[in-house]
Amino acid sequence: MSETVKLIVDGREFEYPVIVGSEGERAFDISRLRNETGMITLDSGYGNTGSCCSAITFIDGEKGILRYRGYPIEQLAENSTFVETAYLLLHNELPTADELAVFSRRLNSSSLIHEDMRHFFGAFPNKAHPMGILSTMVASLSAFYPLPDELDLSAEEQFMANLISQVRTIAAFSYKKSIGEPVMYPSIKLKYVENFLNMMFASPVNNYHLDPDIIQAVELFLILHADHEQNCSASTVRMAGSSQANIYSVISAGISALWGPRHGGANQAVIHMLESIHASGGDGREFIARAKQRDSKTRLMGFGHRVYKNFDPRAKILKAACHKLLNKPGISNPLFDIALRLEEAALSDSYFLERNLYPNVDFYSGLILKAIEIPYDMFTVLFAIGRVPGWLSHWREMVHEEGFKISRPRQIYTGAVERNYLPVEQRDKVTR
Ligand code: CMC
């Protein structure tokens, strides 16, 4: 007999089935809870709530394990490319050589954005944050690439390619706008990452030298950011997508959620933190002391994770990549030394150890981006480019699930109980 959990509410016993995942995680399914008991569960921040079953990404936060479709992140980081990893996430299997060639060609031929959209960039103020531009422009793709009423598989493949490919073009165009240079168009001759770097850094009067080490570093960054199961932005994508909203607006919602400093925005915040420590001439001890004060708003950025209570495997890979890239002649970054010292200090401090706070993906990723001269404001944009295949995979998994429902949590109301409306002349501070 399959496992169940018994719950006693008001002296009555209720039984709920236990769902077991392929890696042995267990949950009790409370779908009938409110109907049967009249009660709901309350789980602020969703730390104990499974919002779906998913076959995309597996994380074991205690052991520091991350796998996409069963493949360990370390193996993908070592051997794969971002485009191949995107294919894997979307299609559940690594592609054959032919499948990869078709997918790459589709991405390449989908990389232009409608020429009228190019003019939108001129309307943003120069100082506009590129994440705001990205989110707006991705939503506006819906006007230029309308979806057919019936979404068949081929239409789905096409708009997924549009999103993966065009997000990179929009990102590079927004950077060009911010520095007052003409945009560089994508080229059919270049691969995904090369194209991005070329659109960012080449200009009509300057060729950009495509350094294989830099290409590899960006590939690695994008692979490591491609998915991370039910994080804040992926959950936002599932939530927005559950209303059957247009996929472009759904991905735009994901981009907005990612922007915050507790999520993708942390990679930019880490560099600000390292720079402020560097500028003050300190070794970070004072910053750590501030981050430990309970009444302070300061946090050690790039540390801590809702799921990892051990090393984030992506941080380990990025730390090794920093050693490799930053030891290259001509590229130097004194902030790396500060980061290493901060990590060492935090990991020998009881505050961080007791709370299981370890470096997360954002702790070292900004150093890589800084070393290859990606501007700060673009850090979270690169995270977004990497995450698009993951968001699309979650959306796709959800909408193809039989009987999928709109997401609609409940609440425990704590406001005023019923009261009568008073005309304005009868209101005073006392009645309030
Ligand atoms: N520095 C100092 N204290 C921290 C930190 C930190 N970075 N992170 C958590 N804590 C403390 C927190 O004050 C709390 O202490 P106490 O128990 O005394 O109240 C305890 O650790 C638990 O923190 P929490 O906020 O309840 O944990 P959470 O799981 O809700 O938050 C987090 C996870 C990632 C939002 C948080 O660790 C954080 O704000 N870290 C810094 C921002 C960051 O690096 N974000 C990137 C996350 S990974 C990539 C991504 O998701 O995009």
Image (cartoon, grey):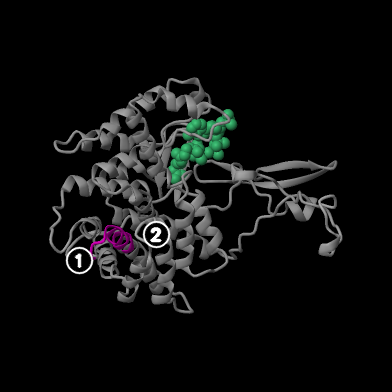
Q: Residue at x 40, y 71 (%)?
A: 141
Closer to the camera: disc 2 or disc 1? 1
Task: Let me know if residue 180 is in the magenta part.
Answer: yes
Magenta stretch, main secondary structure class: helix
Amino acid at the residue labelled 2: Leu
The residue stretch that appears in magenta: 170-182
Name the disc covering residue 90, or none: 2
Amino acid at the residue labelled 1: Ser
Identify the element where label 1 is drawn. Answer: loop
Task: Determine if residue 306 is in view.
Answer: no
Q: Residue at x 18, y 38 (%)?
A: 331
Mark 2 → mark 1, Cα distance in angstroms: 24 Å
Name the residue that disc number 1 marks: 187
Q: Horizontal and vertical percent for residue 412?
A: 74, 50
Question: Of the residues under marks 2 and 1, which one precedes in the sequence?
Answer: 2
Task: Determine if residue 32 is in view.
Answer: yes
The one nearer the camera, 161 or 73, is: 161
Residue 418 relative to residue 339: left or right: right
Relative to 198, is 269 above or below? above
Q: Residue at x 25, y 55 (%)?
A: 193
Q: Horizontal and vertical percent for residue 2?
A: 65, 45
Is the residue under label 1 in contact with that under label 2 (CB below 8 Å)? no
- The local crowd at label 2, few if under 14, some if 14 to 19, many if 20 or more residues have their Cα within 10 Å, is many
Task: Let me know if residue 164 is in the magenta part.
Answer: no
Q: Horizontal and vertical percent for residue 156?
A: 41, 70
- The local crowd at label 1, few if under 14, some if 14 to 19, many if 20 or more residues have their Cα within 10 Å, is some
User: Residue furthest toward the bottom?
Assistant: 149
The count of marks equals: 2
Q: Horizontal and vertical percent for residue 304?
A: 47, 35
